Amino acid sequence: MMKKVYARTTGIQDKVSGFCPGCMHGTVHKMIGEVAEELGIMDRLVRAEGVGCCGLGQNYVSYDTTISPHGRACAMATGMKRSNPDSIIYTYQGDGDLASIGLAETMHAANRNENITVIFINNGIYGMTGGQMAPTTLLGMKSTTTPEGRDPEKGQGYPMHMCEILNQLTGPYYLERTTCTDPAHVRKTKAAIKKAFQNQIDGKGFSMVEIVTSCPTNWGMTPLKAVDFINSDMLKEYPLGVFRDRSKEEKEAE
Amino acid sequence: MARIFMKGCEANAESAVRAGCRFFAGYPITPQNEIPEYFARRLPEVGGNFVQGESEVASVNMLYGSAQTGTRSMSSSSSTGISLYSEGISFMASARIPAVVVNVVRGGPGIGAIQPAQQDYLQATKASGNGGFRMIVLAPSTVQECVDMVYEAFDLAERDDNPVLILADGVLGTMMEPVELPEMKSDEEVAALKAKYYEKAIVGHPITDRKLGVPGSVGTGQEIRNIEAAAMYKTWDKDIRCEEYMTEDAEIILASYGISARISKAAVKDLRAEGIKAGLIRPITVSPFPYDVFKNLDFDRVKGILDVEMSIPAQMKWDVEYAVQDRLPIHECLRSGGQIMTKEKVMEEAHALVKEVL
Ligand SMILES: Cc1ncc(C[n+]2csc(CCOP(=O)(O)OP(=O)(O)O)c2C)c(N)n1
Ligand code: SF4
Ligand SMILES: [Mg+2]
């Protein structure tokens, strides 16, 4: 007898995604779908999408999806969750969306410990608009608006670390940074995503998974080189780990 | 039903709650702070949600989010705050989301004066955001009208799947008047309204019945959506509302809306007492605008129009001019920057018009 041990998640449609070859957006979409199936929340799932390459996912995922103005996904998700607590709502946002134009909405949703899940795709660049500097762009990294490499001496600022920044607040419940460079890290990311959704199901509050990903197209690298660059450079600036997990504190208090 | 004495902002908020509004998000700005403050007290009593947004940008997107669940939702702000709502309102119009927004106008541009004004007419009626969308814009002139319009605005928004704007001003927001409040919708009625919206709501559906909220689309999608929206705007002729006061035999017409129209009405009475055949046309819906009321004037009898607004430069005058073209002289009677229109000023300008045209 043959047994089916692996199937495409029902969380994505039977379509080819619009993401570039080697882009990790696709991997994350797949994991979200799998997690939703495992948790049995697919028919309650709502995606509040930011603006960026994440927009390529709106016709790729199979569940209810809405599109927020650039950067406002956390505010929109706040309104949705408050008015319909039965939905399981996640925002899906890039680094330009979440950490630049939407910084205030992100900070304040975290500060209110809004009961939502935030999937944050940190690829160090504005992918959709063609490779401009993001708040997360590494020092020295070339982008179309930092053609000689990002240089704080030129008034271009420093990389912003969202997990660490949000960890300054009392509000958020769970903050973890992961990556998707190999199967072990993909599994870790999936576990983090699952936890971030479980927290919402349990009514615990603001849970964000920051995923350090690549943008081979705008980094000007092959997919494999881009993976190497994450390991050699990105993860030095953005160390992986759990920054906040109040469930641990709650357990210890018991 | 009993009449009670209430402040405009609070009457507005109570009326919304009675209409079934269960979500409000807003950011403090004078002269409308009593609206969010009232909701903050009142919504928890009826199982609703009040959120003080971190900005107008956040608030309007909270509104957008909540409204997509089929929950009757509202927000209010004033002038400079409404400018920050532009993108969110534009998104709601694009995604065809029903919501109610109140602008308690102050005297701009910029941060403007916090006192009452009517300085946002063109923004409200022509372009509350990018993309050429339209909204029904209701302009109350009494606290009772505020109450009735807010109550009705939710029905209009849901009928059209489009945001509705109430264009009020600081006088209406802060003054107290006796009002008759509309009936309180029961919890069952409120739940039924939400249930009715389920087919459009973004709340999670089985994947065989997924919903996609679209503020824009690729390919021909956007044009089709724009065509659909434009066709919907064309159905609004039936919604045009306008008060005509003593216009049957009028030789001069005062054109005015909102609080200025109320002052103009008092002026019409005094002008009539002086033997001047004056009348008032008061657009109640400033969008859609009652162009035909002006177009159908008897241009042999009517000799001139006095446009009365608390705005400098004049704004509604554009619509009046569009309707009457150069068939009549149109004079202006304007105050601005928080200076309230007075009956004396209207009389003075009316006399000047009479001198010229009669
Ligand atoms: C108000 C507004 N400003 C600018 C844009 C243009 N825009 C679209 S996507 C984007 C950047 C997206 O970058 P990021 O959030 O990092 O997502 P990525 O594409 O890298 O995944 C910008 C600036 C917009 N859509 N709306
Ligand atoms: S541009 Fe970059 S982020 Fe966007 S799909 Fe391509 S690789 Fe992915
Ligand atoms: Mg990016």
Image (cartoon, coloured by chain):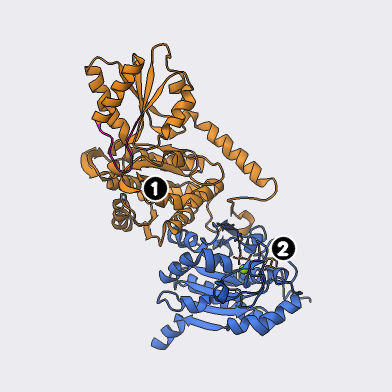
Chain colours: A blue, B orange
Q: Residue furthest bottom?
A: A252
Q: Can you identify the residue that label 2 sits on? A: A17
Which one is in front, B73 or A243? A243
Please tell me in which quadrant of the rendered image residue B338 appears: top left
Mark 1 packing: few (<14 Cα in 10 Å), some, or many (20+)?
Answer: many
Q: Is residue A164 magenta?
A: no
Q: Which residues are magenta?
A: B333-342
Viewer-proximal residue among B89 and A59: B89
Q: Residue furthest right?
A: A1
**Picture quadrant where residue B266 is located:** top left
Q: Is residue A91 visible?
A: no
Q: Amino acid at mark 1?
A: Ser
Q: Residue at x 62, y 83 (%)?
A: A235
Residue B300 picture location, percent across and down = 42, 11
Query: At which x and y percent is residue A4?
Result: 74, 74
- Which residue is depicted at the point 22% across and 17% down? B274
Query: Chain ID for label 1?
Result: B
Position of B326 with respect to B208 (left or right) is left
Q: Amino acid at mark 2?
A: Ser
Q: Element under label 1?
A: loop
The quarter in which the N terminus of chain B is drawn is top left
Question: Is the residue at mark 1 from the same chain as the one at mark 2?
Answer: no
Residue A211 falls left or right of residue B175: right
From the viewer's perspective, is residue A57 above or below residue B75?
A: below
Mark 1–mark 2 distance (CA, rounded to whole Å): 43 Å
